[in-house]
Amino acid sequence: MKIAGAYWQGDENRQQMTRLYGVSFPKQKELNQYLEMLEEAKKRDHRQLGAEMELFMFSEKVGAGLPIWLPKGTALRTRLEDFLKKEQIKRGYQPVITPHIAKKELYVTSGHYEKYGEDSFQPIHTPREGEEFLLKPMNCPHHCEVYGNRPHSYKELPIRIAEFGTVYRYEQSGELHGLTRVRGFTQDDAHIFCTPDQLKEEFLNVLDLTTHVINKLGFDDFTAQISLRDPDNKEKYIGSDENWEKAEKAIIDATKEVGLKTTTELGEAAFYGPKLDFMIKDALGRSWQLGTIQVDYNLPERFELEYIGADNATHRPVMIHRAPFGSMERFIGVLIEHCAGKFPLWLTPDQFAILPISERFIDYCEEIKDALAVHDIQGIIDNRNEKIGRKIRDTWAKKIPVMLIVGDKEVEEKKISVRLQGEDGDKGSMTLDEFVTFFKAML
Ligand SMILES: [Zn+2]
């Protein structure tokens, strides 16, 4: 399959050897299928498609593992974010915005500093005051501060704080891979603070939101992987036995109630609580870990978060960390490969291309483009001095799903000629209003 350099027992001072990789299958047919899958995966590589479609780029000067979103990629990502933001507002989430850096003490309080160690963080020093800040590796400590900003009564709970929060984590350069392994990324993060009694119901709400999101994006094969703590290695984890047992039970009960396909892994829990990860199968049958939900009894303890109960006494809320996409970067990387760059229409950066038959029609094309923008339908005008046949081929090559052709007749009748890809793609001429209705019906 491939070769690589290797050293005997990993010792670089020895002579280099060559490692040969091979695969074998019980049947020729299975080998063929595997090779076909690899070939198809190569064609769908999100790094290549992302560059061709001008979705994102990397720059040597900016640094490895720090993706830059280009206008088309930003359009796609904004649509995804807007979709989730709307769903979250409907479900009672409150958006916040927090800074990209924080003082070291914040992560000492949260326990992240102790857990991840000094090397995982990138310090920033202010030039004169000599203060030390760290790049934010997680949004949770900031959101704990938001919760702690004022006292809360049990009547206000659950409080759901949401943020598309950009975080930075050190990864070795050899580990970096396109959008799926990066050093800076944005989580579709939220933290829910609730009473222990509300935990299961909130967990069910999050499961409902996450499955809704996954289905809407065209993934229909997924399992929920429940990660529990290693019962023989309890000292690895922060928090009391009682809290761990309560949290693990809430997750297991909720997944049963929803009827999710689950697997259980002992010893795979986060250090602060058990979690549930959505493992999604893509079009090539590959499995990806995307969205995650985690129960946490420990951060509220560390940040001394409280609410006043019905009994007038102070209590600790329970915290749920959740991110349906996981990270925007990784999710979009997986989505590109899943749909081979042919996104669902509502996500497509350029939804149409207007092709004028002659330069004389440019003004009319501009009019159409602006009128469609009002209806949140986005696209481009191909005003190059090329033959129409060439423009049509290029439109399909760019994976733009709808073509609007403008010639003498269309300008005269105040219409556009609509064409989709495929056998019966010619949809005839339509007025602008007819097209908007037609387009919206396809979403
Ligand atoms: Zn969190």
Image (tube, grey):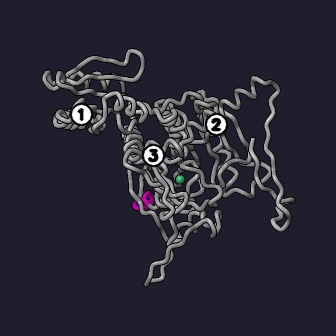
**Picture residue at 57% right of the left edge, 29% below the top:** 258
Per the model, the C-alpha gap separating discs 1 and 3 is 41 Å
| Amino acid at dot 2 | Ser
Residue under pointer 1: 372
Magenta-colored stretch includes residue 147: yes
**In which quadrant of the rendered view does residue 413 lie?**
top left
Q: Which numbered disc, 2 or 1, marks the residue closer to the eye? A: 1
**Which SS class for mark 3?**
loop
**Picture residue at 46% right of the left edge, 30% below the top:** 216
Q: Against 388, is 136 above or below?
A: below
Residue under pointer 2: 287
**Which SS class for mark 1?**
helix
| Amino acid at dot 1 | Leu
Q: Residues within 10 Å of mark 2 (few under 14, many from 20)?
A: some
Q: Is residue 92 visible?
A: no
Answer left or right for 5 relative to 118. Answer: right
Residue under pointer 3: 158
Magenta-colored stretch includes residue 301: no
Answer left or right for 235 relative to 103. Answer: right
Q: Earlier in the sequence, mark 3 or mark 2?
A: 3
* Residue extent of the magenta highlight: 146-150
Q: Nearer the viewer, residue 150 or 226?
A: 226
Q: Quadrant of the C terminus?
A: top left
Ligand 1 closer than 8 Å to label 3 CB: no
Q: Residue 64 in the image: x percent, y percent?
A: 55, 60
